[in-house]
Image: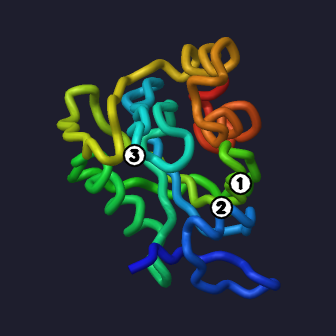
Amino acid sequence: MMDMIPAWVDGKLTPVEKLEVHQRGLRHKAISVFVMDGRRVLLQQRALSKYHTPGQWANTCCTHPHWDEDPAICATRRLKEELGITGLYPSHRDQIEYRADVGNGLIEHELVEIYLATATSQLRIEPNPSEVMATRWVDLYDLKAETLRHPEKFTPWLRIYLAEYSDRIFGAMAKA
């Protein structure tokens, strides 16, 4: 069965196959989660088998909700599916729209629900190897600096979040 995601076609929200959405650059629904330990954020390095941005570092997790799936439920589901994380209840921070070339002729044009969850660095993480090849905790200030020094190591959406929406996502933590 094809992976269908909610996308806007001719101004109407409709299910469209995921690869087609990215090939056409259609605006579509998404979620992004940042798991935080104080000012430290949990990052994931995308598996090399991912069809776009393989091997690049991204926020804790992100995905497209299923048709009619509540974004908060989707955020919790993907924490478990990508990283084996359970027991966290992400809180909604904001809604952000961005458009970015993700390589190989693919475009992400997402209307993203952003979630934050609080944890400690002792959080039990069991990455799904088909999704994630590595994880690490990094201070938000250091992450911003690293994305500027080595942008090629990070997904376009993470760079956009940090450069354009940091205050909206992280609030006071973004200012320190």
Residue lying at the far right of the rendered structure: 10
Q: Amino acid at mark 3?
A: Ala
Instruction: Classify 10 Å Cα crowding around label 1: few (below 14), some (14-19), many (20 and above).
Output: many
Residue 71 relative to residue 135: left or right: right
Q: For mark 1, what is the residue?
A: 107
Residue drawn 71% across and 51% down?
Answer: 105
SS type, badge 3: strand
| Relative height, residue 149 to residue 6 (above, below) | above
Residue drawn 73% across and 46% down?
Answer: 101
Residue 79 relative to residue 114: left or right: left
Residue drawn 63% across and 28% down?
Answer: 174
Residue 167 visible in the current orientation:
no
Of the two numbered discs 1 and 3 in the rendering, the one whose residue sits closer to the viewer: 1
Could you say where residue 75 lies in the image, as x and y percent from the top left? 41, 59
Residue 170 visible in the current orientation:
yes
Q: For mark 3, what is the residue?
A: 117
Residue 165 relative to residue 174: left or right: right
| Relative height, residue 133 to residue 21 (above, below) | above
Q: Separation of disc 1 and disc 2 at Cα?
A: 5 Å
Instruction: Give the camera-side residue of 57 and 161.
Output: 57
Q: For mark 2, what is the residue?
A: 22
Residue drawn 65% across and 68% down?
Answer: 21
